[in-house]
C-alpha cells in the first residue's frame, strides 16, 4: 500500500505539541452582533523577508445592539490603524482579538458599516502544514519562491483580520495580491486582471481575484510560484461549461497533464452522484503546493507528489479526490459550528469509497471501507450537541472526549451503514438532497446554493426522503461514542440476534445474514430478531455493512 491518508491523519495532530490557535467555539456577543457582507483584501507578499503588508476592508450589517465589532488577527501581525472612511476608530489588539469600537452613528441595528484595517508583519510560518498552519515559504527545484497558506485549524486570522467563526461567510470577496513579477498568484474565485508596476525593490504584479459566492475564511488561500497553467473546459451535468485549471510547477508539467485528466474523471463521478459542481460561475482550480493538501474553495491545494495511493488493487489519487469532495461537503454545505465537522470530513471521506465503486466496482468500495474501519477509535461523539472549536473536534488536545479522526472514518461508516439500511435507491436520493435540498438549487450559481447545515438538518433531510424516522440511528452512531454490539446465538436450527446498545438506546437496525447461498435481511424490532437456518451454514453481516463492535 502506498502512503495512506489514514496514517497521515492519525499521526499529524499528535505532532502538534505547543498550545495552538483555534477557530470557532463560543460565539462572542460582539461577533454575533454583525453579519459580514464583503471582504476586500489588499496584500503585498515579500518572499525574501517572509513578510506581508495589507489592508482588509470589511463591509458588515449590524444585526444586534453593540458598541464594538470583534474580529481576530494573530498577535504576530501588527495593526497600524482602523478607519471608517476618513475617521480613525479606537481599537485594541491583544491575545489575537481585534476589538473595534464603533462610533454612535454606525451602531444602528439594520445599518451597514465599513471598516478598513491596515496591518502587516511576519506571519506565522506553518510548522506542519496543513495540520499546523500558516505560511509555507519554500523553494522549487530551480530555487524560485514557492509559497502557500493553510489555516483550517486556526482560521484565516493567522494572516488577515476576519470574523473567525464558521457561522459567518461574506457574500463575496475580492483579493488583490502583489508579488514579485516572476511569480504567479493562484487564488479563489476568478481572475479579473493582472496589473504590472515598478517599485524601488523591483517589478511586481498584482493579481485581482473575485469570489462571487460565500466563502469560509479558512478556505481563502494564496498559492504563489512560477506556475505553468494547464486548462480544460469541462461540460457540467448542469449544461454549463466549467473552466478547470491546474497551476503546476514547470518541472512537473507532464505529470500535471495526467493529473488534470484524473481531475476531470473525479468531476464527472461526483457531479453524477451529488449534482453540479457548486462554483462553476467562477472556476474549478487546483494548485501544486509544498504541503499535502486542503479544500480551499475553487483552488484546491495539491501536494501529493503525483503518487496516487492504493486502498485496493486499483490506483487513484486519493488526495485530490478527498479535497475535491469538500467542494460539496465544506464549501457548498458548511457546518455553522465545528461540532458538526463530520459533515465535511465524514461525508467527504465516504465519497472516496463511492468514487472507487463507480470507477472500479463493489470490491474496491468494500476494501476502502475496511481500511477506514481500522481507523475508528470512539473517543468522543462524532456530533456532540454542545458548541465546539476546531481544537476540541479535531486536534484532540482536550483529552479522551475529542473525536479526532472519527469525524473522518466513523462519519464515513455512518454513511455506509445508512446506505445498507435505506437501500441504494433511497440512499443516493438522500445523498444528493443533502447537497442540494431543493432540486432547483442545482441550477443556482449566484451563491444562493451555498448554505449552513447541521446534524439535525442532515437527519431531517434523510427522514423526509426515506419516509421514516431515523433519530435512533443518528443518536447511537453520532451523538455518543460507544458502538453497539451484535450478539448472535444459535439455538438449534434458529439464529437469534440482539443488539446491545449503550444506555439501552433503541436500535432496531436490521441485520444481513447469509444463510447458505442467500442473504437474508433480518428485521430487528426492539433490537431483537431471528432467522431459521434450515440446516444451512450462516455468516452474520457477510459484506460488513454494519458499524458495530468487532469481536
Image (cartoon, helix red, strand yellow):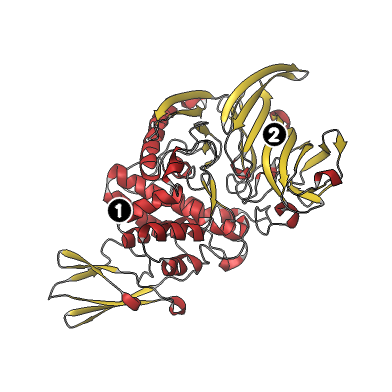
| Labels 2 and 1: the sequence-earlier one | 2
Marking on residue 425:
1
Count of labels in the image: 2
The residue under the point 83% across, 37% down is: 83
- Residue at coordinates 38% horizontally, 53% vertically from top-left? 430
Are there few (<14), some (14-19), or many (20+) residues within 10 Å of tag 2?
many
Q: Is residue 469 left or right of residue 139?
A: left
From the viewer's perspective, is residue 142 above or below residue 480?
Answer: above
Q: Quadrant of residue 464?
A: bottom left
Quadrant housing residue 204 = top right
Q: Callout 1: few (<14), some (14-19), or many (20+) C-alpha neighbours within 10 Å?
A: few
Marks 2 and 1: CB-CB under 8 Å? no
Residue that sits furthest to the left in the current view: 535
Residue 129 in percent (x, y) is at 59, 44
Q: Nearer the viewer, mark 2 or mark 1?
A: 1
Residue 486 in the figure: left or right of residue 482? left
Secondary structure found at label 2? strand
Residue at mark 2 to residue at mark 1: CA–CA distance: 45 Å
Extreme residue toward the bottom, this view: 491
Marker disc for residue 41: 2
Picture quadrant of residue 174: top right
Q: Nearer the viewer, residue 133 or 420?
A: 420
- Residue 525, compared with residue 461, is above or below; it is below
Residue 419, x across and y down, in percent: 34, 58
Q: Position of residue 400 (x, y in %)?
A: 56, 68
Q: Is residue 68 visible?
A: yes
Residue 74 location, x and y as percent? Answer: 74, 46
Amino acid at each position: 500500500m502506498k502512503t495512506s491518508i489514514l496514517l497521515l491523519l492519525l499521526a499529524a495532530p499528535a505532532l502538534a505539541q505547543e498550545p495552538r490557535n483555534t477557530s470557532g467555539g463560543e460565539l462572542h456577543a460582539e461577533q454575533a452582533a454583525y453579519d459580514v457582507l464583503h471582504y476586500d483584501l489588499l496584500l503585498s507578499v515579500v518572499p525574501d523577508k517572509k513578510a506581508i503588508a495589507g489592508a482588509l476592508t470589511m463591509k458588515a450589517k449590524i444585526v444586534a445592539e453593540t458598541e464594538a465589532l470583534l474580529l481576530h488577527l494573530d498577535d504576530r501581525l501588527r495593526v497600524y490603524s482602523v478607519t471608517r472612511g476618513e475617521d480613525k476608530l479606537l481599537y485594541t489588539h491583544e491575545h489575537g482579538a481585534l476589538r473595534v469600537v464603533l462610533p454612535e452613528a454606525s451602531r444602528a441595528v439594520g445599518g451597514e458599516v465599513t471598516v478598513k484595517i491596515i496591518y502587516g508583519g511576519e506571519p506565522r510560518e506553518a510548522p506542519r502544514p496543513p495540520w499546523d498552519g500558516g505560511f509555507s515559504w519554500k523553494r522549487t527545484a530551480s530555487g524560485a519562491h514557492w509559497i502557500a497558506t493553510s489555516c483550517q485549524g486556526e482560521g484565516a486570522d493567522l494572516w488577515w483580520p476576519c470574523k473567525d467563526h464558521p457561522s459567518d461567510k461574506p457574500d463575496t470577496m475580492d483579493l488583490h495580491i502583489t508579488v514579485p513579477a516572476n511569480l504567479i498568484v493562484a487564488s479563489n474565485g476568478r481572475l479579473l486582471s493582472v496589473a504590472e508596476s515598478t517599485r524601488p525593490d523591483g517589478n511586481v504584479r498584482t493579481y485581482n481575484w473575485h469570489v462571487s459566492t460565500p466563502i469560509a475564511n479558512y478556505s481563502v488561500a494564496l498559492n504563489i510560484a512560477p506556475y505553468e497553467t494547464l486548462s480544460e473546459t469541462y461540460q457540467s451535468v448542469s449544461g454549463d461549461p466549467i473552466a478547470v485549471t491546474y497551476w503546476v510547477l514547470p518541472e512537473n508539467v507532464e505529470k500535471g497533464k495526467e493529473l488534470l485528466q484524473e481531475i476531470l474523471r473525479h468531476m464527472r463521478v461526483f457531479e453524477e452522484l451529488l449534482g453540479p459542481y457548486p462554483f462553476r460561475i467562477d472556476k474549478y482550480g487546483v494548485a501544486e503546493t509544498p504541503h499535502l493538501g486542503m479544500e480551499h474553495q475553487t483552488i484546491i491545494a495539491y501536494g501529493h507528489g503525483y503518487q496516487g495511493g492504493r486502498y485496493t488493487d486499483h490506483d487513484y489519487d486519493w488526495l485530490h479526490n478527498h479535497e475535491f469532495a469538500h467542494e460539496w461537503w465544506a464549501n457548498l454545505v458548511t457546518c455553522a459550528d465545528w461540532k458538526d465537522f463530520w459533515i465535511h470530513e465524514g461525508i467527504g471521506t465516504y465519497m472516496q469509497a463511492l468514487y472507487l465503486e463507480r470507477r472500479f466496482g463493489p470490491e474496491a468500495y468494500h476494501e476502502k471501507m475496511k481500511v477506514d474501519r481500522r481507523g475508528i477509535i470512539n473517543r468522543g461523539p462524532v456530533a456532540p450537541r454542545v458548541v465546539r472549536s476546531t481544537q476540541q473536534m479535531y486536534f484532540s488536545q482536550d483529552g479522551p472526549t475529542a473525536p479526532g479522526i472519527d469525524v473522518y472514518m466513523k462519519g464515513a461508516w455512518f454513511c455506509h451503514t445508512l446506505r445498507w439500511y435505506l437501500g441504494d435507491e433511497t440512499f443516493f436520493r438522500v445523498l444528493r438532497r443533502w447537497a442540494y435540498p431543493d432540486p432547483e438549487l442545482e441550477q443556482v450559481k449566484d451563491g444562493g446554493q451555498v448554505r449552513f447545515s447541521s446534524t439535525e438538518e442532515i437527519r431531517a433531510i434523510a427522514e423526509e426522503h426515506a419516509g421514516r424516522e431515523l433519530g435512533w440511528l443518528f443518536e447511537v452512531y453520532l451523538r455518543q461514542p460507544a458502538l453497539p454490539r451484535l450478539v448472535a446465538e444459535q439455538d438449534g436450527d434458529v439464529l437469534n440476534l440482539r443488539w446491545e446498545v449503550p444506555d439501552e438506546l433503541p436500535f432496531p437496525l436490521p441485520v444481513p445474514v447469509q444463510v447458505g447461498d442467500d442473504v437474508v435481511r433480518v428485521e430487528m424490532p426492539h433490537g431483537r430478531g431471528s432467522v431459521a437456518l434450515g440446516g444451512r451454514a450462516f455468516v452474520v453481516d457477510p459484506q460488513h455493512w454494519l458499524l458495530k463492535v468487532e469481536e
